[in-house]
Image (cartoon, helix red, strand yellow):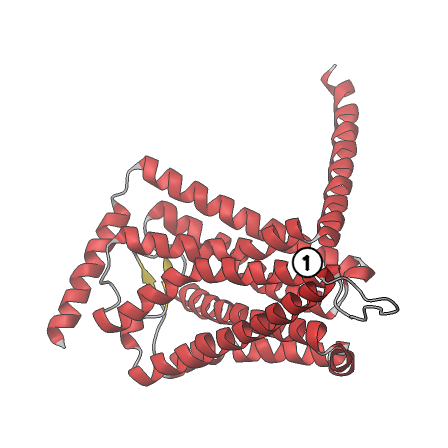
């Protein structure tokens, strides 16, 4: 065990040296990418939440879950903007230890919460598409609000249990953020976190979308058959519902793609230690995980016509107000210049 710990210390020191001795060009590229990802996420998720809050037609049960997911991504991006750029430039954690503990706890909570949110979104879509009468009965505004609160509470289970065992969140020079130490996780901790925070929500999500897919496939097959005389088609599945379901499923696929490196590398870290991989691997890990916060606003904002329309209207209104303000400031400043 001592040799493993000594090896981890040496690898940590090597990663810290690589981070501190980067060239200016590398620092510039890493900072620019980080800034663009965070900016896209903050603006996109904020516009999604604003569109849902301001437009009555968008205040549906599905969109309440989307708003919760967007809020989680927004908070995660704001935390990155607040702490990570300075670390990316300076090559070390420049904020306080309390900030490191806060960042580590919050990011673990929000990342876990995103998985639970997608599971609730999938359950909601299942009832909309397959059990519409039960959906109207059980998915009331009150029940949806309660389920969202539950998803946020559940998201605290891993970082809270990690902290209660007197474990600390430390700055990882490879990943460039304060994060939990996978080498401090016991087999029981890793299994519990893996089953309840990853596997179970993903199984629920996968089963729901599979059942929806099977129902939609049968529905479309019936639509392609010629009708007999005097027979009418009676179905509650609309083209709009099918389109929205496809958008939501695409978010799950993109989100999963972004988080696969996180799950794989941390799983290997449980076995081989916190600092087993080269910095390029950890950098890829952080880039993919950070990019996941932009998945929801990009896909939902672009592919959902109703949301896209409202977001476009907000942007047009903002640009008009900005242009008017610019013209007024110029008009006031021009006489003074003369």
Q: Quadrant of residue 277?
A: bottom left
In the picture as drawn, the residue positioned furthest to the front comes out as 229
Residue depicted at 39% across the width and 79% down the height: 162
Residue for badge 1: 243
Residue depicted at 31% across the width and 56% down the height: 282
Residue 163 visible at all:
no
The picture places residue 139, in percent across and down from the top left corner, at 73, 78
Residue 7 visible at all:
yes
Total labels drawn? 1
In the picture as drawn, the residue positioned furthest to the left comes out as 3
The vertical placement of 199 against 170, above or below, is below
The picture places residue 254, in percent across and down from the top left corner, at 50, 57
Label 1 crowd (10 A; few <14 / some 14-19 / many >=20): some
In the picture as drawn, the residue positioned furthest to the right comes out as 230
Give whichever of 76, 220 is nearer the camera. Answer: 220
Picture quarter with the N terminus:
bottom left
Question: Left or right of 112: which side holds 170?
Answer: left
In the picture as drawn, the residue positioned furthest to the top comes out as 338
Give whichever of 215, 330 is nearer the camera. Answer: 215
Picture quarter with the C terminus:
top right
The vertical placement of 332 against 316, above or below, is above
The picture places residue 80, in percent across and down from the top left corner, at 48, 56
The picture places residue 27, in percent across and down from the top left corner, at 35, 41
Q: Quadrant of residue 216?
A: bottom right
Residue depicted at 41% across the width and 52% down the height: 287
Give whichever of 241, 137 is nearer the camera. Answer: 241
Residue depicted at 22% across the width and 63% down the height: 276
**SS for tag 1?**
helix
């Amino acid at each position: 065990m001592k040799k493993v710990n000594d090896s981890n210390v040496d690898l940590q020191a090597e990663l810290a040296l690589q981070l501190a001795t980067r060239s200016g060009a590398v620092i510039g590229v890493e900072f620019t990418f980080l800034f663009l990802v965070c900016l896209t996420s903050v603006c996109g998720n904020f516009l999604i939440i604003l569109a849902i809050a301001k437009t009555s037609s968008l205040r549906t049960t599905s969109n309440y879950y989307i708003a919760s997911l967007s809020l989680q991504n927004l908070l995660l991006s704001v935390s990155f903007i607040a702490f990570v750029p300075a670390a990316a430039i300076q090559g070390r954690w420049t904020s306080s230890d309390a900030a490191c503990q806060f960042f580590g706890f919050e990011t673990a909570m929000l990342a876990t919460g995103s998985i639970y949110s997608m599971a609730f979104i999938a359950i909601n879509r299942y009832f909309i598409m397959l059990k519409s009468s039960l959906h109207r009965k059980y998915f009331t505004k009150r029940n949806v609000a309660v389920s969202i609160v539950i998803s946020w509470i559940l998201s605290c289970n891993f970082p809270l249990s990690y902290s209660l065992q007197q474990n600390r969140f430390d700055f990882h020079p490879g990943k460039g953020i304060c994060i939990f130490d996978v080498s401090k996780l016991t087999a029981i901790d890793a299994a519990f976190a893996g089953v309840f925070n990853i596997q179970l929500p993903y199984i629920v999500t996968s089963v729901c979308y599979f059942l929806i897919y099977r129902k939609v496939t049968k529905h479309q097959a019936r639509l392609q058959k010629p009708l007999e005389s005097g027979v009418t088609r009676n179905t509650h599945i609309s083209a709009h519902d099918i389109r929205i379901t496809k958008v939501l499923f695409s978010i799950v696929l993109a989100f999963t793609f972004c988080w696969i490196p996180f799950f794989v590398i941390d799983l290997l870290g449980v076995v081989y230690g916190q600092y087993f991989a080269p910095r390029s691997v950890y950098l890829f890990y952080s880039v993919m995980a950070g990019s996941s916060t932009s998945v929801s606003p990009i896909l939902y904002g672009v592919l959902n016509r109703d949301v896209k329309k409202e977001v476009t209207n907000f942007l047009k209104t903002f640009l008009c107000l900005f242009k008017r303000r610019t013209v007024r400031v110029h008009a006031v400043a021009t006489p003074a210049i003369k």
